[in-house]
Image (cartoon, rainbow, N blue to C red):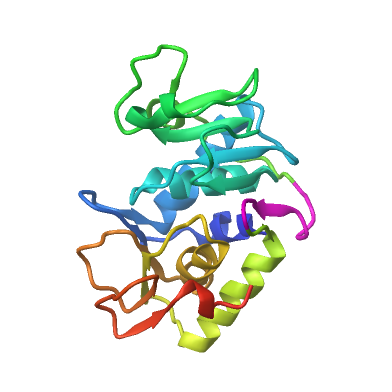
Amino acid sequence: MDTLGDLVARERRSDDPALSVPNSRGYDYHRLCTTAWKTGNFFRHLGVREGVTVAIHATPAAQPILGFFGAVLLGASVRFDPPTEIDGRVLLAPAESVADYELPPGGQYVAYGDPAPDPTVSHFETDVWSENPVFPETPFPPETLALSGERDATHADLLDAGNAVASDWGLESGDSVAVRAPLADPRTVAAGIVAPLLVGGEIVLDADRTADFAVADAAAPESSVLTPGEVSL
């Protein structure tokens, strides 16, 4: 794999579980890949492209993960849990939090969960649902920035770190990895998002579920746990 978009490539679609979230039936690989492409197409309409930033207010829900893949499919970088004033093209946040943020002129605000009361704010679920499920090839080099913030990481950085975690854990298809640390740390993304998807495993965002492995910044119920600081990135 060369870029993070390869994790949601067409040939990876299957009925195997890919993403577990609270109060939802979750996503298999077919649904995850297809919805990631639709998110990319939606973001493209909002001006997302290589060299711009998509700011994402992360919660334990599918939308931040889909937003991450929609952005990186286009060569944009993602800033999880950004400051309230952020030089981003798009902000993706829960409806009740959108008003807390300020983008530069021309920035696009997108709410997830409930629609925002402001009619100028797009609604993620509505707009993504109506998008084309076919994503056109958008080539860019593996050295393209994928995550920005206190620590930056390229596509190659995250894939290399994810592969190292998968190897250290001995991750296999069907294994699950719980995310119990902030996605604002790229090492959490590498271990909790990239590593399981590399092997056909499952990302677990449901805090009430005990997974096979976990990346965590505090005590966790899983038998095998890494802290973000133990991830080489």
Horizontal placement of 83 versus 47: left or right? left
Choose top left, top right, bottom left or bottom right for residue 57. top left
| Residue 228, horizontal then vertical, whole percent | 49, 72
| Residue 198, horizontal then vertical, whole percent | 53, 70
| Residue 44, horizontal then vertical, whole percent | 63, 31
> Residue lying furthest top in this view?
119
Q: Would you say the magenta stretch is mainly helix, strand or loop? A: loop
Specify the segment rendered in magenta.
139-150
- Where is the N terminus found, in terms of image quarters? bottom right
The front one of 55 and 132 is 55
- The answer to whether residue 134 is visible is no
Can you say whether 57 is above or below 115 in the image? below
Whether residue 123 is in magenta: the answer is: no
Horizontal placement of 166 versus 88: left or right? left
- Where is the C terminus found, in terms of image quarters? bottom right
Choose top left, top right, bottom left or bottom right for residue 48. top right
Can you say whether 165 is above or below 138 in the image? below
| Residue 70, horizontal then vertical, whole percent | 56, 43
Q: Residue at x 78, y 50 (%)?
A: 140
- The answer to whether residue 21 is visible is yes
Whether residue 141 is in magenta: the answer is: yes
Q: Residue at x 38, y 67 (%)?
A: 202
Choose top left, top right, bottom left or bottom right for residue 116. top left
Q: Residue at x 65, y 33 (%)?
A: 87
Tag count: 0
